[in-house]
Amino acid sequence: MRMRLVLCSALACVCAVSAAAQSRVVGLTVTLTDTRATASRASVATGSLTVTIVNKGTKPRVFTFAGARKSVAAGGKATFHVVLTPGAFTFTALGKPKTLKGVVTATPVVASGQVTTTTPSSSSNSVLASCPKPVTSTVNVTLDDGKFTFSPAVAQCGTVTFALTNVGKNNHSLYLESSGAQSGALAPGQSERLTVPLGPGSVTWVDGVYETDLGGDAGTLTVSG
């Protein structure tokens, strides 16, 4: 996996990244302290990505990500752009008192109507076992720029299929932080179905592509017992 550098050929870039993803620049912020590096999200869409590094530590850092390298002064801020192909990318912040690392996954834009289903596992079984009366249900989700709408607004405990449709002008993705399940990055007009087991309580969700200040959304979905 490599980002698109200035030296790469135009043909190689087109082959590596879909045209739909290339046309939209999305954002990722990585905040550094002296002991920790925190990415604003665990997953982004493939294609153009604006990376902002905020160094809140007391030491300068050299930040590397997907082949790019950027120096950031203590208390400083830096921004650069990369183009990502599908896969996991490790970022590193070199400097004292220790080297900081993290991982961000680039998810491809999906074809309309693609179905994504989580793989059953012992953890999935334990989630369903926590439901007094687990049921199979569907929640329709419209993904718009800055606003995700869930219908019904309360999910039922059990196996839930999220029927997603992107009605916005930008790519969007649904990421369930509590379970780690995530849809692909949907281009405008595309749809997908994401099926996950949910126990009673609440599920925190975010847009897996855009940060909230860049047109994404975030919130909490209640799951009835």
Image: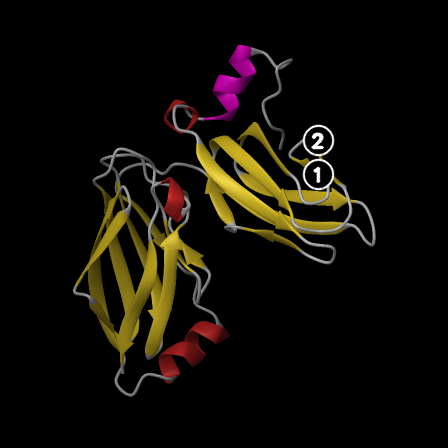
Q: Nearer the viewer, residue 44 or 124?
A: 44
State which tag comes first along the sequence, 2 or 1: 1
For the residues bearing labels 2 and 1, Cβ distance under 8 angstroms = yes
Residue that numbered label 1 is attached to: 63
Up-down relation of residue 24 to residue 199 (above or below) = above
Image: magenta residue range: 10-17
Q: Nearer the viewer, residue 48 or 133?
A: 48
Q: Which mark is residue 69?
A: 2
Residue 22 percent location from the top left of the image: 43, 24
| Residue 104 on image: x %, y % | 57, 46
Q: Quadrant of the N terminus?
A: top right
Q: Quadrant of residue 177?
A: bottom left
Residue 108: say if magenta: no
Q: In this orientation, does residue 118 appear?
A: yes
Total numbered badges shown on the rendered structure: 2
Secondary structure of the residue carrying numbered label 2: strand
Count neighbours of disc 2 (C-alpha within 10 A) and say few if under 14, some if 14 to 19, many if 20 or more.
some
Q: Quadrant of the C terminus?
A: bottom left
Residue 56 percent coordinates (x, y): 66, 50
